[in-house]
Image (cartoon, rainbow, N blue to C red):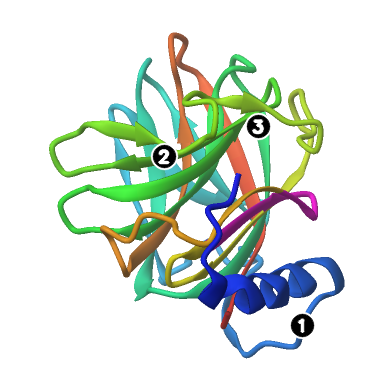
Amino acid sequence: MIQTNPRNVLLILLLLACLSVGCRKRVLAADDFGSADSTRWILEEDVYGRAYVENSQLLIAVNQAETMQYATFRQPYADFNLQVDAKLLNGNLDSSYGILFRRQEGGAFYRFAITGSGLFGIERRDSAGSWEIYNDSGRWQRHAAINTGLGQTNRLRISALGSIVIFSVNDSVIYRNDNFDTTFQTGTIALSAGSFAQPGVLAAFDNFSLTEP
């Protein structure tokens, strides 16, 4: 559901047009992960999991239950069009994978993620570790645009311009809001994978692209 603000109606229509037919925008960053030494990313490794580049993919492994692991792009951005191909390679189908954006130094961020079973969630995490979900239902929702199962690629996209944020999967808009929360107005971007009750998650990302809004 979108909360309508007349000042932003034209911007929403322009963003939706770009999503449907594609717009020529200045490329801010792109990565096909062809090099194992991807210095633009912060690749973390600890007992909880690991982020690494292998076979022209960014891989994120999660070794513990109730854990999220991510790889952070070093440059911060406020407004952008982001898309990336993502898939779950291993783990319970309820495991999640997706994008963090406008991420803060203290560990706060917005999150757009899907599961191998076809659910999506749009959330905010604050620095104290509490979560708020923005889905209309107040919980993760199922969407037919999401390809389900292991090894199934989903193209995730976020178009963010101030308070106007549009989330898409496989070129289908699944949520949009022209009055999205602006507690965090800029920050870094990260690719993430997360476990719930079961560990052993492995997610892969490829064809990362970041353009101006």
Q: CA–CA distance between discs 2 and 1?
A: 28 Å
Q: Earlier in the sequence, mark 2 or mark 1?
A: 1
Q: Which residue does the image show at 61% across and 77% down from the upper left?
A: 11
Q: Earlier in the sequence, mark 3 or mark 2?
A: 3
Q: Which residue does the image show at 75% across and 75% down from the upper left?
A: 18
- Left or right of 47, for residue 129: left
Mark 2 lies on residue = 123
Q: CA–CA distance between discs 1 and 3?
A: 29 Å
Outermost residue toward the top in this view: 197
Q: Nearer the viewer, residue 80 or 136?
A: 136
Q: Which residue does the image show at 62% across and 26% down from the upper left?
A: 141
Q: Nearer the viewer, residue 52 or 111?
A: 111
Q: Main secondary structure of the magenta part?
A: strand
- Left or right of 53, for residue 163: left
Find residue 148 and report its horizontal and vertical position in percent: 77, 26
Q: How many marks?
A: 3
What secondary structure is found at the residue carrying circle 1? loop
Mark 1 lies on residue = 23
* Residue 61 versus residue 44 in the image, above or below: above
Q: Nearer the viewer, residue 177 or 9?
A: 9
Find residue 144 and report its horizontal and vertical position in percent: 81, 31
* Residue count near mark 1 (Cα–Cα under 10 Å), binned few <14, some 14–19, many ≥20: few
